[in-house]
Amino acid sequence: MSNTADVLESVPTLTPDKLLKRCRSAKKKIFLLSLPCLISPDKIGTISQPPVSLTALLKLLSNDPSNLVYILSGKAPATLEQWWGHLDVSLVAEHGFFESEHIPGKAETGAREWKALEEVDLSWKNKIISVFQHFSDRTPGSTLEQKHSCLSWYYSSSIETGCIPARFRAQELQSHLDSSFVRPNVVKGENVIEVRPYECNYANIIKRVVDQHPDFDMLLYVGEPVILETLISDPRVVTCGIGEKSAKYYVDNVNDLLDLLQTLTADKEKTIPSISQ
């Protein structure tokens, strides 16, 4: 077995005991939670509302004054605000192009302020919308989301309904984008292909959050693999992968992560409905 394989095999599971031990000794905790780690990736492109139990969990987690909760997503600001704008959480939309920082006392009024990245080149977008639309039209059941700074093509429903060419067309689309003279960042997820500006990535989001709150005692990041020195070397940071051993810890699936977060709220002697999806 190679050294790399040995390292991956040695990545431990993030258990409730390990996370509780970290949280109980921390006065200021930051939770950076990626949407595909809270909702099964095959459902993100098709649901109009998040599970009620997930919203209840986020409400309890964010109600703890020692917790700063960030939801990281590729969704548009309007969608995130509709879902969780009433909660005491910070919302990061379109992979970091937009951010709505939690301001104590403002969540209940429904007033959300959004800040956008400046000087980001989006000229590529109009050049490739027609390409995405072409593949979407040829793939029954697929969904194209057009947002301000990025495009997302979901095809999980196509696979579920028996559209055999769906995966082939996804590979064809990605190959076309990779060879295009237009050079946005092309990202292949679980049954989704996205294009976004290179400036929109979770590494930049994490840097901004750490710069804003350098006095944190514990930071939990759950999301796509990120190469960032802060995540690797800072002993206050806990990183967790879902179904892959690419971080300090991992859990098998979304439900395992939700159970972990539920454990933290239960530790405050609170209970919520089952959150399994």
Image (tube, grey):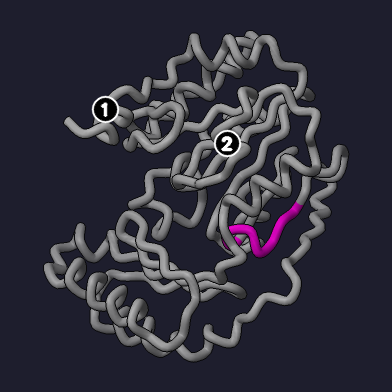
Q: Quadrant of residue 250?
A: top left
Closer to the camera, 9 or 139? 9
Which circle, 2 or 1, is nearer the viewer?
A: 1
Q: Secondary structure at mark 2?
A: helix
Q: Which residue is mark 1?
A: 6
User: Per the image, is 129 magenta?
Assistant: no
Q: Is residue 79 above or below residue 11?
A: below
Q: Position of residue 144 (x, y in %)?
A: 41, 73
Q: Position of residue 127 (x, y in %)?
A: 48, 91
Label 1: few (<14), some (14–19) or many (≥20) C-alpha neighbours in 10 Å: few
Q: Is residue 261 above or below residue 100?
A: above
Q: Quadrant of residue 11?
A: top left
Q: Is residue 91 left or right of residue 101?
A: left
Residue lying farthest to the right in this orientation: 105
Residue type beneath disc 1:
Asp
Q: Which residue is mark 2?
A: 231
Measured Cα–Cα span from mark 2 to mark 1: 21 Å
Q: Quadrant of residue 107?
A: top right
Q: Quadrant of the N terminus?
A: top left
Are the two marked residues, 2 and 1, in contact with CB atoms closer than 8 angstroms? no
Write the residue at 53% across / 59% down.
74
Q: Quadrant of the C terminus?
A: top left
Q: Secondary structure at mark 1?
A: helix
Closer to the camera, 130 or 275? 130
What segment is highlighted magenta in the picture? Answer: 94-100
Write the residue at 20% across / 66% down.
167
Label 2: few (<14), some (14–19) or many (≥20) C-alpha neighbours in 10 Å: many
Q: Is residue 159 above or below residue 178?
A: above
Mark 2 or 1, nearer chain start: 1
Write the residue at 51% across / 51% down.
49
Residue type beneath disc 2:
Leu
Q: Is residue 210 left or right of residue 95?
A: right
